[in-house]
Image (cartoon, rainbow, N blue to C red):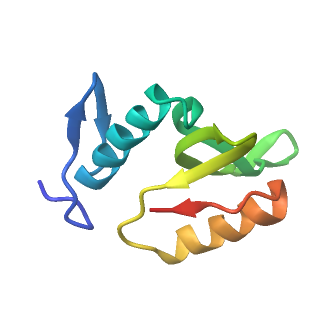
Amino acid sequence: MSSKYHNKQVYRHGRVFDSKKEAGRYNELLILQRAGHITKLQCQVPYLLIPSQYENGKCIERSCKYVADFVYWQNGQLVVEDAKGMKTDVYRIKKKLMLYTYGIKIKEV
């Protein structure tokens, strides 16, 4: 079955990536980490943007999260990165919420 945006999942380094682009970027980041240019590389890091909404103890709206493809430290700065192929409207809103909520500007590659 083909995905909505025609990307194909890729299995590398014991992980499943949503696209060849994301898997390729992971390879690049591993090289940068081994060379000491970046540290603390993480994949698929969730950020809570809007908490779940409850009424009378019942959840009426689920939480809204952004899941960063990669998070790492470079030159003492936190970098949140997305290997973006298609910038959907939902992604654009979540990108703005990341900046508003956490002061984090997502790096797109």
- Decide: is 22 above or below 42: below
9 left or right, relative to 93: left
Check the image and name the residue furthest to the top.
14
Q: Which residue lies furthest to the left in this view?
A: 1
Query: Count of labels shown?
Result: 0
The quadrant of the rendering that contains the N terminus is bottom left
Q: Where is residue 98 in the image (x, y as percent from the top left)?
A: 72, 59
Residue depicted at x 58% and y 61%:
107
Indicate the quadrant where residue 31 lies.
Answer: top left
Q: Position of residue 59 (x, y in %)?
A: 74, 45
x%, y% of residue 64?
66, 54
- The outermost residue toward the right is 56
- Residue 21: x and y in percent read 29, 55
Q: Residue at x 54, y 68 (%)?
A: 91
Quick one: 92 or 84, which is closer to the camera? 84
Left or right: 5, with 36 as reference point = left
In this rendering, is residue 58 above or below 16? below
**Among all residues in the image, which is located at the extreme bottom?**
89
Q: In this view, does 79 lie above or below 30?
A: below
Q: In which quarter of the image is residue 29?
A: top left
* 63 sits left or right of 32 in the view: right
Identify the image quadrant of the C terminus: bottom left
Determine the residue positioned at 54% across, 29% down: 36
